[in-house]
Amino acid sequence: MFTDTQLDRYAEVLLWGLKKARKGSLNPGEVFLVRYNLPAIKLAEILQARLLDMGMNPVMRADATPVMEQQFFDIAGPQQLVFQPPGEKAFYQHLNGSIFLHAPEAITHLSHIDSNKIAQAAIARKYIRDILEKREEKDLFSWTLCMYPTKALAKHAGLSQKAYTAQIIKSCFLNRRSPIDEWERIFQNASEIKAWLNSMQVQHYHIESQHMDLEITPGESRKWIGISGHNIPSFELFLSPDWRGTRGVYYADQPSFRSGNLVKDITIQFKRGNAFEINAKKGLAFIKKQLAMDKGANKVGEFSLTDKRFSKINQFMANTLFDENYGGANGNCHIALGASYSDTYDGDTSTLTKKIKSKLGFNDSALHWDLVNTEQKQVTAHLKNGKKMLIYENGKFTY
């Protein structure tokens, strides 16, 4: 597991991420939520002390244990599934920051639960995402999250807990005397690539690999973002495209765990922005139910590319936070089905309304599910002037 020094460095990196994710500054007296699973309690204690020392007001919340989650979905009636505690809305309307320490003690404990129940509970809590998104657009809120190693994660990744922990240490630079210096270096390099990508007038992107032939339309008023402090680690650069221009075939070769379910080898065909044909070697029924969760669940909310020169992740980690940032031999691309990110809007996000987002093709959903392709691939930008430019090949941006 982590040494005390590595835990201190992890806390330092998370606070760096929280500050980077805010355009303005963090101010004394603000309210910060620290959510954690029980195995990560020591890191939570360190963060509480750091936030208090900064003059903040930390609110510490332990997430439900696997037994609690399973009992909830096994026993809860229709009204209980969608129940929201009194005061919850007001709390999030005043929240300035959030750190989530993801340390699941089980990841398949909900595999027997009807996924419609899981979807109902998720939809009932979507208002929280909407509140926080609007606060982030106004620069009143920032968030970050990380992963803490557990036996369950290591088991499903096919690694020992020691090897799993080592991957986190290496990927987050906790083995460096000053991990912040390394994160700042990557941040600056990524900023140059984002500026290059955002200088292009792109009609659509064409993504090709052995099993994939997909077109993504960035749409109007879009920009590439990423490595902004939101996730630790994060090496991806991404945008939320105009979902209406998605067409072709997407393939996710990397397994994915979601709500206790394992899915493998997913092929999705898109036409006029909608997923209309889905196949998978495992978990097909679950995927179909997830994509029927609401009107936006079968549409693309994010398109992402990871440069293998940034990412040190070279193992499947059975967790999206790491798997969507996989470097390995070929880097990765991924799409997220469901909700889009309004901070990829190339303008003043505080002026965004639901009507404007809809007009621009930003997708809205209670779902946000990242599906990752690690095949060797190339991505070509088809420019509005009729020219083409290869922007990504052999796991690297061509910048």
Image (cartoon, rainbow, N blue to C red):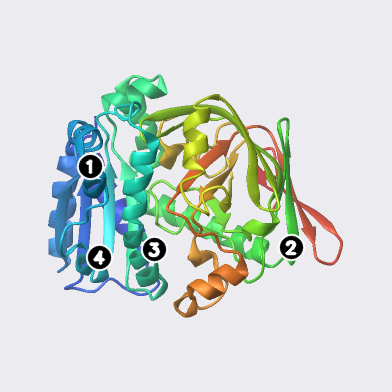
Q: Quadrant of residue 155?
A: top left
Task: Where is residue 225? Give x, y as percent.
Answer: 54, 60
Q: Looking at the picture, which amino acid does disc 2 mark?
A: Val
> Mark 4 and mark 1: span between their CA atoms?
26 Å
Q: Kindly identify which numbered label has been placed on residue 21.
A: 3
Q: Looking at the picture, which amino acid does disc 3 mark?
A: Ala
Q: Quadrant of residue 75?
A: top left
Label 2, secondary structure: give it: strand
Q: Looking at the picture, which amino acid does disc 4 mark?
A: Tyr
**Residue for point 17% across, 61% down:** 51
| Mark 2 Cα-neighbour bin, 10 Å: few <14, some 14–19, many ≥20 | many
Quadrant of the drawing holding the N terminus: top left
Mark 4 lies on residue: 92
Closer mark to the observer between disc 4 and disc 1:
1
Mark 2 lies on residue: 202
Closer mark to the observer between disc 2 and disc 1:
1
Label 4, secondary structure: give it: helix
Residue 33 visible somewhere in the drawing: yes
Task: Where is residue 180? Give x, y as percent.
Answer: 36, 53
Mark 1 lies on residue: 77
> Mark 4 and mark 3: span between their CA atoms?
18 Å
**Residue for point 62% across, 71% down:** 221
Q: Kindly identify which numbered label has been placed on residue 138.
A: none
> Mark 1 and mark 3: span between their CA atoms?
38 Å
Above or below, 43 relative to 27: above
Q: Nearer the viewer, residue 178 or 149?
A: 149
> Mark 2 and mark 1: span between their CA atoms?
49 Å
Q: Earlier in the sequence, mark 4 or mark 3?
A: 3
Q: Looking at the picture, which amino acid does disc 1 mark?
A: Gly
Closer mark to the observer between disc 2 and disc 3:
2
